[in-house]
Image (cartoon, rainbow, N blue to C red):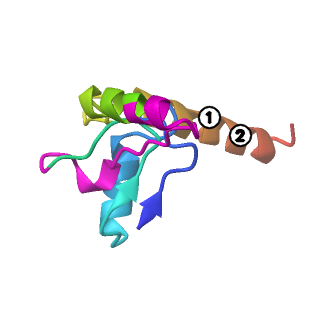
């Protein structure tokens, strides 16, 4: 089981990261996208939800709202976040090489 750091799809991780986790041999991974997992949910992008309340009625309402929510997932076409990260790493490496 893997958990994406911070875990926001297309913000903190992208589809390339999903592929990396899959290729590393993880059987499943958790995002921080709210929602309910179904049979069609990508096991490498499982949503999670914590209803932050101790009041029984409010807890039930939050659970029901969560069941209706469609979780966000990183997609193959949403690679801009990964591309920005690669460019940032390359820029930092160039700065170290030039002594900046």
Identify which residue is drawn at 71% across, 40% down: 92
Q: Give the quarter of the figure containing the N terminus.
A: bottom left
> Is 87 situated above or below 31?
above
Identify which residue is drawn at 36% across, 44% down: 47
Q: Is residue 90 visible?
A: yes
Residue 100 position, x and y percent, is 86, 37
Disc 1 is placed on an element classified as helix
> Is 42 situated above or below 52?
below
Q: Tell whether 85 sits left or right of 68.
A: right
Front one among 91 and 57: 57
Q: Which residue in the structure is indicated by mark 1?
A: 88
Residue 70 position, x and y percent, is 26, 29
Residue 21 position, x and y percent, is 38, 61
Question: What residue range appears in magenta?
Answer: 39-60
* Cβ–Cβ under 8 Å for marks 1 and 2: yes
Q: Tell whether 54 sits left or right of 26.
A: right
Report, in whole angstroms, how far the alpha carbon at label 1 lies from the one at label 2.
6 Å
């Amino acid at each position: 089981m893997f958990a994406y750091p911070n875990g926001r799809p297309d913000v903190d991780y992208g589809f390339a990261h999903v592929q990396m986790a899959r290729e590393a041999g993880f059987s499943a991974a958790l995002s921080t996208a709210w929602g309910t997992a179904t049979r069609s949910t990508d096991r490498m992008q499982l949503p999670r939800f914590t209803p932050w309340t101790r009041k029984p009625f409010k807890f039930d309402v939050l659970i029901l709202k969560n069941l209706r929510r469609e979780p966000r997932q990183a997609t193959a076409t949403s690679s801009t976040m990964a591309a920005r990260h690669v460019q940032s790493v390359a820029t930092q490496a160039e700065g170290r090489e030039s002594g900046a």
